[in-house]
Image (cartoon, rainbow, N blue to C red):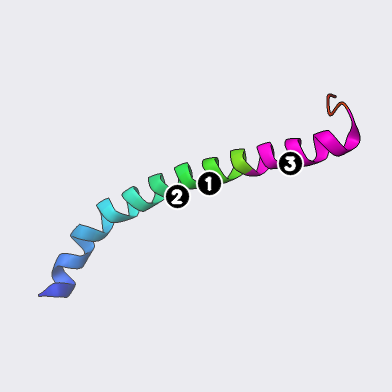
Amino acid sequence: MVQAMLPKALKPMRFYFSTVYQEIWVGVALTAYAYYKISYGESSGSGHH
């Protein structure tokens, strides 16, 4: 009974999680980039390329 319901619930859940994970990874990448720019930008002087 539960196994028959799982495939139907799995598709929207997989789509939801992939969308959420994309947003999380974008946020993580932007945060890491900003942290990198701040920490290494200050120590190297100007920080502009």
Q: Amino acid at mark 1?
A: Trp
- Tags 2 and 1 in contact by the CB under 8 Å rule? yes
Q: Farthest residue in the right direction?
A: 44
Magenta segment includes 40: yes
Q: Amino acid at mark 3?
A: Tyr
Residue 42 horizontal side relative to residue 14, left or right: right
**Picture quarter with the N terminus:** bottom left
Which of pointers 3 and 1 lies earlier in the amino acid sequence? Answer: 1
Q: Secondary structure at mark 3?
A: helix
Q: Residues within 10 Å of mark 3 (few under 14, many from 20)?
A: few
* Residue of label 2: 21
* Residue of label 1: 25
Query: Quick one: 27 or 47, which is closer to the camera?
Result: 47
Give the residue at x 53% y 41%: 27
Magenta-drawn segment:
32-45
Magenta segment includes 38: yes
Q: CA distance from mark 2 to mark 1?
A: 6 Å
Give the residue at x 20% y 66%: 6
- Report how many numbered discs are placed on residues in the image: 3
Disc nearest the viewer among 3 and 1? 3
Query: Quick one: 22 or 7, which is closer to the camera?
Result: 22
Q: Which mark is residue 3?
A: none
* Residue of label 3: 36
**In the image, residue 7 above or below residue 18:** below
Residue 9 drawn at (x, y percent): 21, 59
**In the image, residue 46 above or below residue 23:** above
Give the residue at x 67% y 37%: 34
